[in-house]
Amino acid sequence: MTRLLSPARIAGALAGLVVAALVVLYLVPSNDYIFLPDAAHPVAPLVRVQGGNEPNGPGSIYFVDVFERRATLLEKFFPWIRSGATLIPASLVVPAGVSDQQQRNADLREMTMSQRVAAAVALRKLGYHVVAKPDGVLVDAVELGSHADGKLQPTDKIISVNGAPTLTIAQLRTELGKVKPGDVVTLGVKRGSKLLTVKIPTIADPLDPHRALVGFTPNQSADIVLPIKVQIDAGNVGGPSAGLAFALQVMEDLGKNVARGYRVAATGQMELDGSVAPIGGVKQKTYGVRKAKADVFLVPAGDNAREARRYAHGLRIIAVKSFQQALHALATLPPKR
């Protein structure tokens, strides 16, 4: 005799299957990354400047970071369950052939360099004698499976391509622009105290098949000598985008009231010439600045500023191209009420 299941039992079984499916979707990682907002953080506790004092006025400088991790399948299919989230293909976050840990280490090296550049720019603006010279292109991570794999190592410095000096990333790109994918390039490499010559066949850029690449993630290296000691400890936060905020805080520590009573959030990669370069995760950072109830948000001009304004919801966005422009913008704000 066949027993029929009651509607209640069928509904319970279906509910159980749904719950089990949701648990699986929540636990299993996808091939995408998810960017999530984090509230902006005060910079003052992270910065110590020789001879400086921690500001005690009403104003303050904030930096913004982004939670970045592999998305679960649930988040991939339903990204709206996370406020302010953005799904990013893994290939745009971690280059092909580079492990998550290698990319993480590269991000931390970028953060270290950004801190030194920020200190150099701020001290130079204050009239200190600062030595800051680009001295090569740092290899942050090597693409596994490329011809560079086994020939280059993380922390190598590329100082020439086919005999032409490449002390900056721009120079490296210029020289690689003279060759075709598949051509062999001769690299001058500084590894510790050793100078090496390495020949590597180039590969095609996946996004532009006519552009030649060597097969590594580049970062700018520079010889920076500061006249006073500047310590910045951002913990496990990686990447270069807090440079502008760090430079502003160094000014504050040395007695310059750049915040002028405002809660000032800032993002942007500082370059040695004082320019402010674009960064990623602007949507999440704008959410984070709003969460911290900052008064203004300094953002690199161009696409970054346009994106920030999309999510500002009343937050004042100030687009800047340089450190000098950021200081001028803050100096000309109306008195804080």
Image: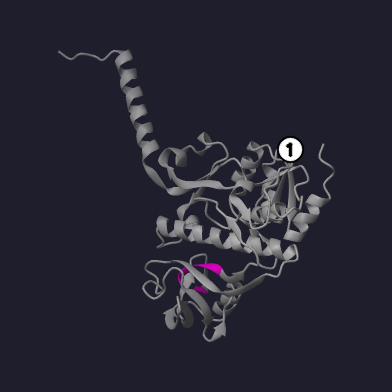
* Position above or below: 13 against 106: above
Instruction: Say which amino acid is labelled 1.
Output: Gly
Is residue 85 shown left or right of residue 29? right
* Position above or below: 83 against 68: above
Query: Secondary structure under badge 1?
Result: loop
The residue located at (70%, 46%) in the rendering is 55
The residue located at (37%, 38%) in the rendering is 27
Residue 223 quadrant: bottom right
| 241 or 230: nearer the viewer | 230
Is residue 118 shown left or right of residue 111? right
Is residue 169 shown left or right of residue 99? right
Tell me where residue 84 appears, x and y as whole percent: 58, 39
Q: Is residue 270 visible?
A: no
Q: Is residue 243 visible?
A: yes
Q: Secondary structure of the magenta portion, mostly?
A: strand
Residue 22 quadrant: top left
Tell me where residue 281 appears, x and y as whole percent: 58, 50
* Position above or below: 2 against 236: above
Q: Which residues are magenta?
A: 212-220
* Position above or below: 200 against 277: below
Q: Quadrant of the N terminus?
A: top left
Q: Quadrant of the C terminus?
A: top right
Q: Which residue is mark 1?
A: 314
